[in-house]
Each structure stands twice: as structure tokens, then as C-alpha cells.
Image (spheres, helix red, strand yellow):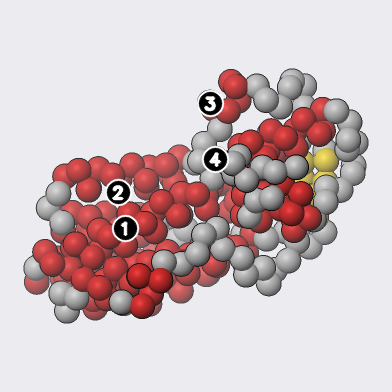
Amino acid sequence: MNFNALRSYKKIGNELKAQLENQQYKIGDKLPAERDLAEYFNVSRTVVREAIIMLELENLVEVRKGSGVYVIALPQRAASNDEFLDKVDVGPFELLQARQLLESSIAEFAALQATRSDITKLKEILSMERATLEQGDEDYVADEDFHRTIAEITQNEVIVQMQKALWDLRMNSQMWKGLHLHIPNQSYRHLWLQDHENIITALQRKDPAMAKKAMWQHLENVKQKLFELSDVDDPNFDGYLFNMSPIVVDR
């Protein structure tokens, strides 16, 4: 079966639902490993993972860390129902891909525009991030401020609104929340402080290439850490949703 043209996790999720409805699996059965499902559907493992999250949010499967994915209920309606396709939101790794492409270019442009006061503001936000994490607070206010401020440095309202739209998708995404159900704590977020410092340094030096690479690598690090923390089959999974751009890495 070739699902190459149907890469969306929604399509894969609905195909799995169809298999459940056709009683290919029963309640209590364990689904094939993520790697096997990826090979069967001819898609990346991240697409399969997002499809599993979709089924989990519908209370059809249960993800048991270190064990696998188990069927806990069967769908009541056909999996291809268009109404459900309209309601489900974007996948977390799909969203990270969009942010990586957009925000790396935003940082590149911001490096040309940044002023002394802009750098001071970003450093103040970084201090707030550090204090928030040290207090064990799990909110993302300072993180959001950091990325929004970089967009505002461009002085382009369209860019600001585009960045805001992506962040709003993240904050309102049930798929994103579903992914984080399997992450026991927020300690990994301390890793982003150094990433943010690197971005500030590039902006302060007014180095567009360095800023673009720093932002790209930051969101790549986020993606890789979420891979590691959310993978239900293999904690050492090192796959990618898409290849890192050689233009960004080698400049």
C-alpha cells in the first residue's frame, strides 16, 4: 500500500480507525510497533506518532510507555468521516516544521534590524525564563515573549501576525497537549536557555546567517527532544520529519 501522497497524519489516523472498525484489531490488542506502521503506510514515524495521538485523543487507544499502543475502544462511525477531518488540528511535529522554516528567516531579518534596546529586552526576557524554570513554573509566557519579540524586531506587522498565528496554533492544539501527556516533567526546557542565549548573541552581532542558524538549531533541538521524550517504541529513535536544510547548516 502506497500512502506517499497521503502523508498527513489525519489520513493515516483514519486508516487505522477503519482497521479498528473492520475488527482487524479487538479491544485489548496491541497495535504494531511504530516502525512497522511507518513501513506499512510508507510514511515517516513522526506521522505515525501523530496519528496515534489523534486516536488517543478520541479514546480509542492507550499509549503505555515502554510497552506499546493498545486498543481500548472501537470507533462508532466510519473513519473517513469528513466532519472529523475538519475538527482535528495540526500535528505537533508538522507545526514545529512550519515554525522552523518561518522563525529561522525571521531571526535572519531581525539581525539586520536589532537595536541596543531590543537586545536589552531579549536579555530581560531570558532572565524571566530562567527564573520561571527555577521556580518550577510550567507556563510558556516568557518563551512566547522571546519569540514574539524577535518577530517584532523586524518591524513588519505581517511577519508579527504570522508568528503569532503559529504560536496560537501551538497553545490551542489538542494534538500538542496529547503529545505532552507522555512527558513527566518540564526539566528539559532548561536546555532552551542556552539556545536562546545563542540567538541573542547572533542578533547582538548583527549576523543574519548566525541568527538564522541559531534559531533553526533551537527548533531542531526542540523537535529532537520531543522525539526522545514521546517515542513509545524506541527511546533512541533518531528519525527526522524532514532533512535539515544544508543551506542553513553550512552557511
State whether residue 78 is above or below residue 64: above
If you read the primary sequence from the N terminus, does the residue marked by circle 3 or circle 1 appear first?
Answer: 3
Which residue in the protein does label 2 denote? 163
Label 3 to label 4, Cα distance in Å?
A: 14 Å
Q: Position of residue 36 (x, y in %)?
A: 78, 55
* Residue that numbered label 4 is attached to: 174
Give 81 or 251, whichever is nearer the viewer: 251
CB atoms at circles 1 and 2 under 8 Å apart? yes
Q: Amino acid at mark 1?
A: Glu
Find disc 1 in the rendering and name its residue: 103
Q: Residues within 10 Å of mark 1 (few under 14, many from 20)?
A: many
Query: Which residue lies at the image location 60% right of the left edge and 22% below the top edge?
Result: 82
Look at mark 3 in the image and give the residue it sits on. Answer: 86
CB contact under 8 Å: marks 3 and 1? no
Q: Residues within 10 Å of mark 2 (few under 14, many from 20)?
A: many
How far separated are the C-alphas under marks 2 and 4?
19 Å
What amino acid is labelled 2 in the image? Gln
Q: In this image, 248 relative to 79: left or right?
A: left
